[in-house]
Image (cartoon, rainbow, N blue to C red):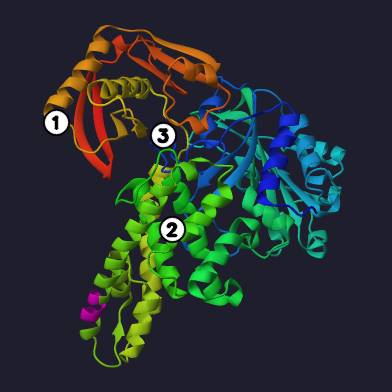
Amino acid sequence: MKTLTSETLRSLYLEFFRSKGHAVIPSASLIPENDPTVLFTTAGMHPLVPYLLGEKHPEGTRLTDVQKCVRTGDIDDVGDEAHCTFFEMLGNWSLGDYFKKEMIPWSFEFLTSEKYLGIPVDEIAITCFAGDEDCPKDEESAEIWLQCGILPQNIFYLPKSGNWWGPAGTTGPCGPDTEMHIIRNKAEAAKLGPYDFEKAPSGTFTEIWNDVFMQYNKNEEGRYEPLKQRNVDTGMGLERTLCILLDKPSVYETDIFEDAIAEIESLTCRKYTEGGETTKAFRVVLDHVRTATFMIGDPKGISPSNVGQGYILRRIIRRAVRYGRNIGLPIGELSKIASTFISKYKDVYPELVKNEARIHEELETEEAKFSKTLQQGLKEFEKVADAVPAGGTIDGVTAFHLYDTYGFPVEITDEMAKERGISVDMPGYDAAVHEHQEKSRTASAGQFACGLADHKEETTYLHTATHLLHAALRKAISPDIEQKGSNITDERLRFDFNFSRKLTPAEVAEVERLVNEQIALDVPVVMEEMPLTEAKERGFTGLFESKYGERVKTYTIGDFSKEICGGPHAPSTGVLGTFKIVKQENVSAGVKRIKATLTRTE
């Protein structure tokens, strides 16, 4: 196999698919646009859902990119060999263009060609959909793999639980996928029959790539119908792939983390290679600082808070501080570690350099706040411990309360308890953690169940009203106002923008007046496609330019609003109804939030 760096792997992937006629598009923001169902962009396909559903993409029907992603559902596993909360996903898409007979040979070529990854054919195993009462066995994919040169004994079949994608909700596009794995233990792999893949001992295979073939639509009756537009959606995790190709024991031993490891070692006088809890602590700090750097440095700029994305960011930073404490990392030094990641990614994600000062400020401020929180935790521990008799035990629920409420690590609780001649009910603590996680998963199941953007009429109209609101704020309040985020449901819009204070009642009234004036005029909403450079020259506002490709969609509302946007929108403003600002909120220092509604009369 080739020895690669992260920079080389990104370049090879994009170069390969560019040679196959794909347009290279930039990564979208970590914050999904106009999608209230998820907090973060969790997969490469997430920003492309409207186009997978049939909307025309300005760059055409063949696309490839490297997408920034965040997943926090398994944050407690960070510190092992493979889990990362932030990761990059290499991907390519066919929007009703090519399908299996093109994609599978391309996958084979990229994996095995010496020009690209150079993986020996006999080290690759393939899984395909086994078929069921809904859809037939995917023999087509298996046959194409055989024609490419994959060994027959290395092709396996899995049910829907293993080789099927979607739908994201209860209905929608879906289809079989074919996964590519590196064979880590040939002796064990040789014992398996074509349907025995899941019986393989742990470590026999490592997944490296996944090709999804969206060829069905699951309707409301639960039937699977062939799609008119068949799509291909692939995903290859950059960190995981590097780890595999370099034959490293974990993703943290790749070039991505080497400068950050050196910085932590310098700050703590500890070594990453010490093993055990020390290595785990290094990994948690590495992962969480990298994730926080990308969250804060994102074009939509997240700040620590007690809700939504800000809550996740706060938890990640504080977790980094707690694990940093375990290896002697001084409070206030996370920004130095962040600097190594900014330097590492500066050519790939220039927004990190642009927002470097903000990244440092947010990290330092949050660390200082948490330092005070830790002090409060110490005081609470003293109260708890004073109530426990000599030789007694701090119950698990109380220990979890110290952690959950005050951010007080259970390791510190246990250590200080032993100094007092008492103990901590660790099984009880683990049970309390488990119960909390179960409640959290249950509560968030609805929120995270679907990655599809809501394209209902009400949502579409509110999206159009958001453009009017943005323009009205710039006209009535300040031309320097820029959108910092938005979230739109079918009931209200939420718009975040840079401003130092809440609007006065008179300013609110003026903004509402300007928006409703445009609605009363029934102005057509005109969409045009054009090169990004032309859109800039013609004065269109690009809210988050880093996500756009060379060609963009623009929406003009008379001489009032001109924005680059992916849509969808109302045909004209007259259908929107009456615009009303219902609430103002603080998001973070210098960022305000407006919530507004539309009332329509039939």
Residue 170 position (above or below residue 76) = above
x%, y% of residue 105?
Answer: 80, 36
Comes first in the chain, label 2 or label 3: 3
Q: Is the magenta stretch mostly helix, strand or loop?
A: helix
* Residue 117 screen position, x and y as percent: 78, 47
Q: Earlier in the sequence, mark 1 or mark 3?
A: 3
> What amino acid is found at the position of numbered circle 2 in the picture?
Ser
Where does residue 246 sit, x and y in percent of width and height? 73, 58
* Pointer 3 residue: 35
Residue under pointer 1 = 504
- Residue 409, percent across and down? 37, 72
Q: Pick the residue in front: 37 or 365.
A: 365
The answer to whether 297 is drawn above or below residue 279 in the figure is above
Callouts 2 and 3 close, C-beta under 8 Å: no
Q: What secondary structure is found at the residue carrying circle 1? A: loop
| Residue 26 located within the stretch drawn in magenta | no
Closer to us: mark 2 or mark 1?
A: 2
Query: What residue appears at the point 46 percent right and 17 percent down from the top-left corner?
Result: 554
Q: Specify the amino acid type for callout 3.
A: Asp
